[in-house]
Amino acid sequence: MSFPLRASFALSFAVLGIGQLCAQLVLEPTGSVERPKGNWADTVIVTYDVALPLAGFRRIDASGTIHTTHLVLAEHPSAVFKRMLGQGLVAIDQPGALLLKVNRLHMDEMGKRTSCSLHAEVIERSEDGFRRLHEGTVTVLGDRCRSDLPCYEKLFLNSLLAFFLQYEDAIATDDGRPGPLEASELSVPFRVDPSNTPILGDQPPRRGMYRSYLDMRMDRPDSLYNFELRETVSSPGGLRVVKVKHMSAEAEEQYWGLCTGKHPYVRVGDEFHRLDRTGNGYTASVPQPATSDPAAIGLGALFFGALGAGVAAATTTTATPPILFDLDMLSGGLVPHDRSRETLTYAQHIFHITRFAKSEAPMTLTCDGDTITTLLKNQWTSFSLPPRATKSRVVLTNGNSEAIFDIDTNTDRLEVHLIDVKRNEMITVSTLKEQMRNAVLDDLRTEDRRP
């Protein structure tokens, strides 16, 4: 490695909240990372959906009420990453410029830990185009952050630091994967296919231990360790859950997984769970400890991280079925096969034109510049928006009349906005309190709903 990398922190943050049902954590990172040597470009390309929050953590308070905490950035992530790169950046069109391309940034909770997963690429500008120097995923673990914003920011910065260290190691050991790139590929997410993911080819991964998911994905086993397996008591048979004979827990932690030459395995705690090929991916069926409440397993996955639910259930006498997980082919993480269990609770907004409106003329509803629908008197529509640091702008237009107002996405409850049109064609909008909201909801008819 050419030189040590360091991270510096200068924290600035804000916490927003609505009632007791929801809180939104807004990150405004100002820290920087000492980047590897090279002419780093003043442009950072982000290909993941920046409208989505970095994380959505569900909590159950003492009263049993479920609420959601969303983690969002106060500005576009490209600006945040550019600031983390520091000063002295060069223009992207300069030959030899190094471009950071970020394809995923996600945080999660796993038991008592918080994780930050980053998938990125380093791309070099050449005289005649672009080429990829490195691609990889890093996952940084820390103590469970809860509402501690500096904790999340430290994980954020450390994930970029870890990626740069990985990049330097790959370059130093000629383990990078340089290859030509078309300019059109710069702005699209990294493609996972047999050309860059050999384990999706016709042949199973080679026998050996894999120190990282990327090693497994690229079929680069550590063949120096000649292992033997034994099936665990928790395994349903067929060598689905195994341990490595005569291997210490410390040694196991150095490996992401292994492959027998027929089936790959992913490490979960101190066990290795078999991965089964399904089309263009892999699944793992993770047996659950017996529990007195089968729903607790699902809640554990829903609220506190998918992987944590697989290893942290309370043991009693009632057997529970295994949970099926998909292997995320980009990051190597396990996610519930039923993606609805991952669905974030976003604010739902209902817009209803009162039956007392003095105009029958169609009313167009737009949100943040996008047309949602057109409504007539007594009709209604609903939509959900991902939470973010700023409010969304809603515009209602009826002939020559217009009403503009902002809605806050920082809530996980249902909001009802009642629209009225006065005799002078003036549009008014009222966001209803609980009693009136419930009364309007009771009167809404399915046939009056518009997409």
Image (cartoon, rainbow, N blue to C red):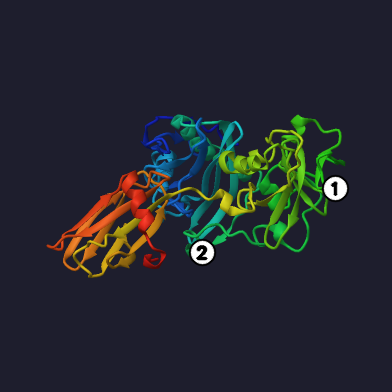
Q: Amino acid at mark 2?
A: Glu
Label 2 residue SS: loop
Q: Amino acid at mark 1?
A: Gly
| Nearer to us in this view, 242 or 202 | 242
Q: Label 1 belongs to which residue?
A: 237
Relative to 120, residue 204 above or below: below
Q: At 72% from the left edge and 57% from the top edge, which residue is drawn?
A: 199
Q: At 44% from the left edge and 40% from the top edge, which residue is drawn?
A: 85
Q: Along the horizontal axis of the image, is 200 left or right of 54?
A: right
Q: Is residue 36 visible?
A: no
Q: Label 2 belongs to which residue?
A: 182
Give the farthest residue toward the bottom.
361
Relative to 303, residue 378 above or below: below
Q: Is residue 247 visible?
A: yes
| Nearer to us in this view, 192 or 180 | 192
How many neighbours does mark 2 have within 10 angstroms: few (below 14), some (14-19), or many (20 or more)? few
